[in-house]
Amino acid sequence: MISDRQSQHLALLERLQGCFLGDPKPDTLPGGRTEALRQLHAFDPASYGRTRNYLDAAVSRLSPYLRHGMVSINEVRDHLRSRFAHDPIRLEAFFRQLAWRDFFEKVLTWYGRRLENDIEQPKHGVSRSEQIPPDVLNGDTGLPCVDGMLHELFANGYLHNHARLWFAAYVCHFRGVRWQEGARLFRQYLYDGDHASNGASWQWVEGTFASKPYFMNKENIATFSGGKWCNDCSAKCPFDADYPTLQHRLFGGSTAPLASENETDEPQADPRPLTCANADDIGPFTPASDLVWVHDAAMSWDDEALKANPTAAIVFVFDEPALQAEPWAYHRLGFVLDGLDDLYAHLPNSIKLTLVGDPAELLGEIASRMGATTIHVSEHPNPAVVKTIDKLRMNLRMVVHPRPVFADYPQEPKRFSRYWDKVASQVLGYQPNSSKRMHQ
């Protein structure tokens, strides 16, 4: 027998046809704040600093929950500070990674949609293709390491950060593809795919938001992967050289190596018609003066906008125009559906709506039918959130609830090292002895 929850999910999926990639399947990662808190309470960062660059490292796996606002970086920091108050040094490496996330969100806040283009000129003169080659999209490059990373990405929606850097370097430097194409692929498939960390990291690899491009060699991959791909590899390895040789090979010519002019096949768009929900599908509504818009980066019942409005109507809108333009892998959609179930179960509000369509149009229509004059929302630099708030402001009073500050840094965020020099004591609660620079 199908439960009410399953029935509701099936109805939503029917309306979301054309907005996701792949067929519905059991989720590989449960979503929601309840699961986020469970993982946070189970995480011990004692070995994080020592092992973080290895694929089998004791990482937290909290990034999908942070991406969707199911838990915040402030909560993570404060919980770990309290739990390990007797040993603050064990937290330093992990807190530095939380600071990377905060830094990238400050980058997105500062640049907005400009982050979708090169922030700086590339530190090389190599041309780039605008399409990812079909063998990469199909996970059929013939390189066990690259194909293994792609399988992990497509099947599980996850890649260790070091693998993300390797894959980005392969796409940009070894295949000569624009970083924007790779960033889009990650946003579609990664549970934690976002505009801030994702876009800025790809630019860091390309060298459009760093002093030099990042690339790796075979020794680096073999060392930090534990030889999982290299030990039995018989492929002709493009990474098998020392760094000076690769530096010249990748950036010494006028065109990028391994990119071919005939690699222009594009994945075909899903031709199925899209059925979307609108406000006419539901109702009638109880009159209300306020409602709260929950977006996909603020999915916590501890969110300030929700806590301040325990009786207001709650509205979540799957952004149909955005998802048509850039469909998510189904597992990403399932993760958000889990998160909504968990969120709604913990809210006292009597009206909780999940819709599909244009967020500004639907929120405006719901507000009009309820007689609401005010919409509450949590602050976030995601360009889609900013754009929707600006549209709604033309006709409604918008109350944007600010998020707690992780680290105060009013300057333009140009380099993480400068940011960290200024904010380390805020993040850690003490001044670290060493300012040694580490990659992400």
Image (spheres, rainbow, N blue to C red):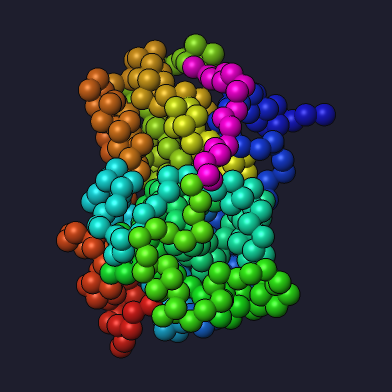
Q: Quadrant of the C terminus?
A: bottom left
Left or right, residue 262 beside residue 438 = right
Query: What is the x, y in percent for residue 46?
Result: 53, 80
Q: Position of residue 184 (x, y in %)?
A: 46, 46
Provide the major secondary structure of the magenta segment. Answer: loop
Query: For residue 41, which quarter of the picture?
Result: bottom right
Query: In the image, what residue occupies the spot 30% across and 33% down?
Result: 387
Vertical order, 25 against 182 (above or below): above
Front residue of 250 and 83: 250
Q: Would you say residue 269 sits in the magenta stretch?
A: yes
Above or below, comparing residue 287 to residue 339 in the picture: above
Residue 265 falls within the magenta-colored stretch = yes
User: In the figure, residue 215 lies in which quadrant?
Assistant: bottom left
Quadrant of the frame with the N terminus: top right
Q: Nearer the viewer, residue 45 or 181?
A: 181
| Residue found at x 35% / y 37% | 385
Q: Which residues are magenta?
A: 262-278
Q: Can see residue 31?
A: no
Q: Position of residue 281 (x, y in %)?
A: 54, 13
